[in-house]
Image (cartoon, grey):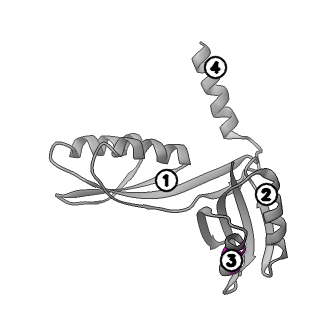
Amino acid sequence: MKHTLSVLVEDESGVLSRISGLFARRGFNIDSLAVGPAEKQGISRITMSVRGDNRTIEQLIKQLHKLINIIEVKNVTNLPCIERELVLFKVSISNDSRSYLLEIANIFRAKVVDISYQSLTLEVTGDAGKIFAIKQLLSNYNILQIARTGKIALVRDSKVNTEFLKQSFSYYSTSI
């Protein structure tokens, strides 16, 4: 199972190296990683996607707590969260495909950030499902390059789980 960990750390050199070293020693691969400044100066938030069962992830979290410069480690996998990723797609275009690609961009609310006679670069922000869906459509064209950030996530204070709502809505719409 894929887990999302949110880690607050002191913004000191070597913190990320110690974390990745811990993962490497334990034989874990980090599926995605995003690091940036948090709400307080001198603090950074690291968001990681890691595969493992619940017991293994609990052990990993305990090991993370033992590292210096770690302030807080939270497994937000089953908490109501806002999750986003950013992807840049550079796609080869022709006169025939240009309007189709612009229509796809419009439907997915993607931004056209660069265009030439040979290529179109789209910026797409959203959850993993949206990223997957647009990538599937764009794969019918010649994707020249992809650059993708890691997932970032914040826990919802409203406690509303939009994934649950999506599943409930799809249940009701298919049973009507």
Question: Where in the figure is residue 94, as x and y percent of width and height?
Answer: 17, 49
Q: Residue at x 80, y 78 (%)?
A: 67
State the residue lying farthest toward the bottom: 13
State the residue lying farthest toward the top: 176
The residue tagged 2 is 56
Q: Nearer the viewer, mark 4 or mark 3?
A: 3
Q: Residue at x 73, y 67 (%)?
A: 7
Q: Which residues are magenta?
A: 18-22
**Mark 2, secondary structure of its residue:** helix
Question: Where in the figure is residue 169, as x and y percent of width and height?
Answer: 63, 26
The residue tagged 3 is 21
Instruction: Return the mark for residue 114.
Output: none
**Mark 3, secondary structure of its residue:** helix
Circles 4, 3 touching at the beta carbon (< 8 Å): no
Q: Amino acid at mark 2?
A: Thr
Q: Nearer the viewer, mark 4 or mark 2?
A: 2
